[in-house]
Image (cartoon, grey):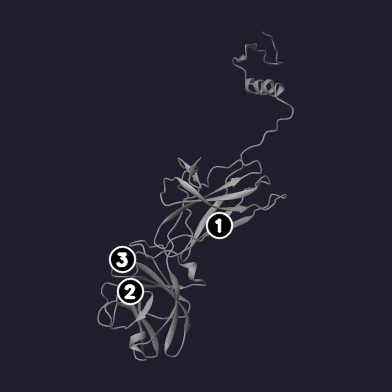
Amino acid sequence: MAFVMYISGNMKLIMIEEYTVMLKKSIFGALIVGLLIFAGCNDDEVYDPVPQPPQGVYSVTGDGEVYIWWNGPYDRDVAEYSIFRTTDPNGPYTEISVVPAEDNPNLDLIIYSDTDRVATNGITYYYAVASVDHAGQMSDLSAEDVFDTPRPDGFMALTDTTTGLSTAGWDFSLSDRISASSVGCDVFLDYVGGVFYLNAGDIATSRNVVLQDMGFADTFDEIGWAAQSGWSDNGWVEVILGHIYIVKTDDNHYAKLWVVDINPTSVSFAWAYQLQVGNPELVGANDSSNKETQPASITTNGINR
């Protein structure tokens, strides 16, 4: 079968023979093919595009858990979001959670979050999020390079060395107070001339422990990564309410302390300690946007897609 179609202003011959369409040098070729295909479609078929992936994905480190945040796409046809995790940046990713999407008739910006509560301290995890529409179609994975290494944290109070030497020191590896004279002491508190000071190491020597004052912070999470320079030359810093201090231990672990209260004979701190050697991550968001939009393979409940 063959027929001839003429297009006003740019006459071209279209030959259709046994489902073959020959379009020659026509700027309207693609449009014509689309019209011909549409004409042969079932009237009941509706084009249903795959949803867009979430954007702005980032994570916040916790103690044995990781908090994941993302922006939903401006699309009403999203039923849920699938959260994926892996310990290998090249995948495969495994689905660990599903979060229902809110109805979004006005196409507003909606921010979502989820918590990975089965993360192990000291292990680095990589995260991604995908959108799923009401027909079950899944988007590509989010493009942001999101990774996190959860670590222990808590609160403690140190006395000054004059008030109580045995409770003036702190050992991050033990998450416990120890004597400021112990060789396992990472930092200790003393009181000189009416001022509290935080000191590196034990009372006899700093043992290559270094520390620095990062300044005032409104929240503990404000300082997420340990600085690599700017350490105190004399091995001690003045204790100031609201300030955060970074510590690098003699076995190359990073930690931080936030002064939450100062009493006449003691100081209360919030603390966090990174179990992974040499990893400066203490808390915070990671979204350096280097990850592929889709890894080589995705695993959902252990099954490759």
Q: Residues within 10 Å of mark 3 (few under 14, many from 20)?
A: some
Earlier-in-chain disc, 2 versus 1 = 1
Q: Are marks 2 and 1 in contact (CB under 8 Å)?
A: no
Between the residue at mark 2 and the residue at mark 3, the CA separation in whole angstroms equals: 16 Å
Say whether residue 210 is left or right of residue 138: left
Residue 236 in percent (x, y) is at 33, 79
> How far from the left and from the top, in percent, is residue 297?
46, 41
Residue in the image at 51% along x and 61% along y: 117
Q: Horizontal and vertical percent for residue 109? A: 65, 53
Say which residue appears at 42% left-offset and 48% top-offset. 89
The residue labelled by disc 3 is 252
Residue depth check, mark 2 versus mark 3: number of the one nearer the observer: 3
Count of marks, rendered view: 3
Q: Residues within 10 Å of mark 2 (few under 14, many from 20)?
A: some
The residue at which mark 2 appears reads as: 232
Say which amino acid is labelled 2.
Ser
Q: Sequence order check: which comes first, mark 2 or mark 3?
A: 2
Q: Residue at x 32, y 75 (%)?
A: 186
**Above or below, comparing residue 124 to residue 185 in the picture:** above
The quadrant the N terminus occupies is top right
Kindly identify the residue that appears in the image at 67 percent across and 15 percent down: 10
Asked if residue 122 is positioned above or below residue 52 in the image, the reply reads below
User: At numbered mark 1, what does the secondary structure look like: helix, strand or loop?
Assistant: strand
Quarter-of-image position of residue 161:
bottom left
Task: Give me the C-alpha separation between circle 2 and circle 1.
Answer: 35 Å
Disc 3 residue type (three-letter): Asn
Gap in angstroms between the C-alphas marked 3 and 1: 30 Å
212 vs 160: above or below: above
Label 1 crowd (10 A; few <14 / some 14-19 / many >=20): some
Task: Check contact, mark 3 vs mark 1: CB within 8 A.
Answer: no
